[in-house]
Image (cartoon, rainbow, N blue to C red):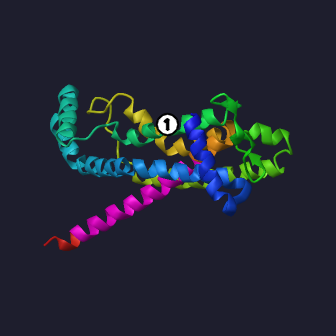
């Protein structure tokens, strides 16, 4: 963790002439962008898997028609169909899981008063008036909701709420139908799918309870995911349009 602290400190020193006291906050945003850039190939693979899953829906409907009276046979046929298409029901979780170590490193780094036996100087850094090691409750206790630090959190909450609302509407719009129980559905997958549209709103809770540095990571990553999904969706639509034009 001390190595990571040194990296953040050096990057903040490079950014200091431009961003002054908020240079460490900007360094965390850039670090988050780097992590998301490294995970981007998996995000593209996830998008391809989602397209492949959507393409299977007509075949799944046919299997339901043929084996509707035999749930076990239908379940096996649907699972075999996904296996033949190399589609994993948990593939979409990989980009998020691979980001967890970076988040926890930031959380620990800005929660400890010492790093490598030395005083943690990063705790003295801030985003405007809000210390990077502080939490929303600290901001409320020093100036209140509309105090200098409180206004920083209100800005983050407004940003997250806007992103969450957009994601909710888009997820509800493009969500693929989930097979009924016994029709090849992975146990628990239906509940997860139903929960997904609301997931972004829980980012508000995360921002409120973790150190501000970790909250910046979450907000930046959430914003990146939103833009990334929109661009991949546009790319998919453009590809489908070109294929349609080229089809005799």
The picture quadrant where one finds residue 205 is top right
Compare residues 151 and 134 and report the one nearer the observer: 134
Q: Position of residue 241 (x, y in %)?
A: 28, 69
Compare residues 40 and 48 and report the one nearer the observer: 40
Which residue is pictured at 19% across the width and 46% down the height? 59
Q: Position of residue 40 (x, y in %)?
A: 39, 51
The picture quadrant where one finds residue 5 is top right
Q: Is residue 186 above or below residue 21?
A: above
Q: Is residue 130 above or below residue 68?
A: below
Helix, strand or loop: magenta stretch: helix
Look at the image and tell me in which quarter the N terminus lies: top right
Which residue is pictured at 79% across the width and 38% down the height? 138
Q: Position of residue 216 (x, y in %)?
A: 62, 47
Which residue is pictured at 63% across the width and 46% down the height? 9
Compare residues 38 and 168 and report the one nearer the observer: 38
- Would you say residue 131 is visible in this rendering? yes
Q: Is residue 222 magenta?
A: yes
Q: Which residue is mark 1?
A: 100
Disc 1, SS: helix
Q: Is residue 89 magenta?
A: no
Count neighbours of disc 1 (C-alpha within 10 A) and say few if under 14, some if 14 to 19, many if 20 or more: few
- Would you say residue 201 is visible in this rendering? no
Which residue is pictured at 22% across the width and 44% down the height? 61
Q: Position of residue 195 (x, y in %)?
A: 48, 38
* Left or right: 70, with 42 as reference point: left
- Which residue reaches farthest top? 72
- Which residue reaches farthest left? 248
Q: Is residue 53 above or below residue 187?
A: below
Q: Is residue 214 above or below residue 223?
A: above
Q: Which residues are magenta?
A: 219-243
Look at the image and tell me in which quarter the C terminus lies: bottom left
């Amino acid at each position: 963790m001390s190595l990571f602290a040194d990296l953040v400190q050096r990057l903040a020193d490079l950014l200091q002439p431009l961003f002054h006291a908020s240079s460490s906050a900007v360094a965390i945003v850039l670090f988050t962008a780097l992590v998301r850039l490294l995970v981007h190939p998996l995000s593209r693979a996830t998008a391809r898997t989602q397209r492949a899953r959507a393409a299977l829906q007509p075949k799944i409907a046919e299997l339901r028609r043929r084996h509707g009276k035999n749930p076990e046979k239908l379940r096996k046929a649907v699972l075999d169909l996904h296996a033949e298409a190399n589609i994993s029901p948990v593939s979409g979780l990989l980009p998020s899981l691979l980001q967890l170590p970076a988040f926890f490193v930031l959380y620990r780094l800005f929660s400890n008063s010492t790093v490598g036996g030395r005083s943690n100087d990063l705790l003295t850094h801030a985003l405007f008036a809000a210390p990077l090691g502080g939490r929303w409750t600290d901001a409320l206790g020093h100036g209140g909701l509309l105090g200098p630090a409180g206004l920083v959190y209100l800005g983050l909450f407004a940003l997250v709420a806007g992103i969450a609302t957009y994601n909710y509407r888009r997820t509800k719009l493009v969500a693929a139908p989930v097979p009924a129980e016994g029709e090849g559905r992975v146990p628990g997958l239906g509940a997860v799918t139903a929960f997904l549209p609301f997931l972004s709103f829980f980012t508000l809770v995360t921002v409120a309870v973790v150190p501000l540095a970790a909250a910046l990571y979450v907000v930046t990553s959430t914003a990146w995911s939103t833009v990334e999904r929109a661009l991949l969706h546009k790319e998919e639509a453009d590809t489908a349009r070109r294929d349609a034009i080229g089809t005799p």
